[in-house]
């Protein structure tokens, strides 16, 4: 199988980049094809702006979704974005590796999403009407592929627990796992999260690497997070709310979008 | 009072920038001092890298938190970051205005946070020991000030409701409201969120502007989101988990960090 690893840390010797390397090595040992995209090494342009849409007439306002859709349709996106989209189509699995900065991804990786996820490619896909709100959340251009996060966090694990002060890690990552990965169709695997990343010693790194290798061995067999498909009957259309006939009306929040008891 | 508005949309005529302008105008009418920081107009550097720490010896690894703390302490951060920190100290209130891209802020704004929020300034503040985990979540350098988000979203409001397919807007914004704003000490006001931003007509804009003006009139009197202070007795130290004596043990997730029934 083909795997794309996108790594986003400015220090080549960082834990993030080391873990990306371990993942790539293990996947190659399993016989897979791996591409590692080191966004810092590639000097990735992080910011969406007018220069992303060279065919947009100077007289026209930059409406980002419209410009993105038009450029995608006409093949006039910039070369760097087109190349990354091709990698996403090539890859059977996508791994995003990053340090948790301010409870989300570093700007360079957010900018990779903002730019590569064009309208018509990652959103605005499929029929949009009163009967159907597009192919998203389990459907879309990247359906049938898998995705997974490798996250390094500076804080302690209990701080990210169910009652930890930062909020539960699965909820903090929901906007990424559900909103960025599941949205265009990926089956999303549970994240691989490392805590106290700044204080890791040699023994800790060895143990963490072994755990990550185990996860890489089961990348294509592990059970994904059972998010509910948008068009699978659990949501009303076009309001896109959980139907009380399908999902206990008492359930609200992120957890309600995960099928339990599977 | 002094207010800093940070606006993050590439189109000068966007709804985001228009609302930033409405907010600034109303606040000035109230007699306040307002600075608007248009990150795109300023060509803000979004990506944390080695060039942010010119005093870091080339032989040394870039450990971001360490380098950030050292540069902050020795006054060797870059001019653009130092200027923004001064604005944050000047401002009695901070407003972040942005389009919701992939359920978070655009990369340029994330990079403003990543770079301006230096170690020793926005985190790593106060005593860190077994008895106290720093001044954060309600305490810190920016305590006593207020902050608020102005968010424009493309989707429909029910899609962001308690049972909407995207997840509830307050939970999607928790990593920002709680993790970025409350963390260094801000009192956080409920966000001002506009839906179907791409389809807004003249009448809709007028109505939205009026609602925003109302919010600006009460910027310094409105009740903030009642998040729990880290060092207020609700959390154990150093595990930083909600104490069962203080908070119903059945409560978990983001909502548990908000004091209810006030």
Image (tube, coloured by chain):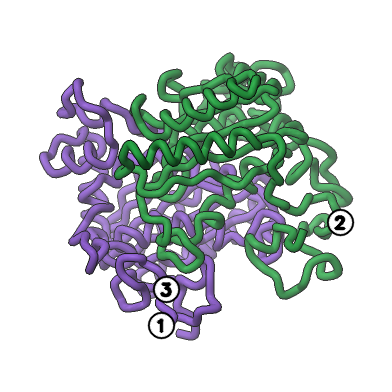
Chain colours: A purple, B green
Q: Secondary structure at mark 2?
A: loop
- Determine which quarter of the picture holds residue A49: top left
Distance, label 3 to label 1, CA atoms, is: 7 Å
Tell me the residue that label 2 is attached to: B233
The disc placed on residue A242 is 3
Distance, label 3 to label 2, CA atoms, is: 37 Å
Residue B194 appears anywhere in the view: yes
Judging depth in this view, the residue of A186 and A74 nearest the camera is A74
Q: Secondary structure at mark 1?
A: loop
The nearer-to-camera label among 3 and 2 is 3
Tell me the residue that label 1 is attached to: A246
Instruction: Say left or right for B255 vs B229.
Output: left
Q: How would you rate the neighbour count of disc 2 (Cα within 10 Å): few for under 14, some for 14-19, many for 20 or more?
A: few
Q: Quadrant of the N terminus of chain A?
A: bottom left
Assess whether mark 1 and mark 3 are in contact (beta carbons under 8 angstroms): yes
Instruction: Say left or right for B110 vs A182.
Output: right
Q: Quadrant of the C terminus of chain A?
A: bottom left
Chain under numbered label 1:
A
- Whether marks 2 and 1 lie on the same chain: no
Assess whether mark 2 and mark 3 are in contact (beta carbons under 8 angstroms): no
The nearer-to-camera label among 2 and 1 is 1
- Whether marks 3 and 2 lie on the same chain: no
Q: Position of residue A115 (x, y in %)?
A: 31, 39
Distance, label 2 to label 1, CA atoms, is: 41 Å
Residue at 30% x, 58% y is A184
Q: Secondary structure at mark 3?
A: loop
Residue at 80% x, 47% y is B133
Judging depth in this view, the residue of B69 and A176 nearest the camera is A176
Q: Position of residue A45 (x, y in %)?
A: 35, 31
């Amino acid at each position: 199988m083909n795997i794309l690893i996108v790594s986003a840390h400015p220090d080549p010797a960082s834990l993030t980049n080391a873990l990306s390397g371990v993942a790539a090595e293990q996947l190659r040992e399993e016989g897979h094809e791996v591409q590692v995209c080191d966004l810092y090494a590639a000097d990735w342009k992080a910011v969406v702006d007018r220069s992303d849409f060279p065919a947009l007439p100077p007289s026209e306002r930059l409406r980002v979704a419209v410009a993105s859709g038009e450029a995608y349709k006409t093949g006039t996106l910039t070369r760097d974005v087109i190349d990354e989209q091709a990698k996403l189509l090539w890859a059977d699995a996508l791994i995003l590796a990053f340090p948790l900065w301010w409870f989300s991804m570093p700007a360079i990786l957010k900018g990779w999403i903002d730019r590569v996820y064009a309208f018509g490619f990652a959103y605005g896909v499929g029929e949009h009407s009163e009967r159907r709100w597009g192919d998203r959340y389990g459907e879309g251009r990247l359906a049938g592929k898998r995705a997974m996060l490798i996250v390094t966090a500076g804080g302690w694990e209990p701080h990210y627990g169910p009652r930890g002060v930062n909020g539960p890690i699965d909820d903090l990552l929901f906007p990424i796992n559900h909103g960025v990965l599941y949205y265009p169709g990926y089956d999303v695997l549970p994240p691989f999260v490392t805590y106290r990343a700044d204080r890791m010693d040699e023994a800790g790194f060895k143990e963490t690497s072994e755990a990550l290798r185990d996860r890489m061995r089961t990348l294509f067999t592990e059970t994904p997070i059972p998010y509910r498909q948008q068009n699978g009957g659990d949501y009303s259309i076009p309001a896109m709310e959980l139907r009380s006939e399908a999902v206990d009306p008492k359930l609200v929040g992120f957890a309600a979008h995960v099928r339990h008891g599977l």
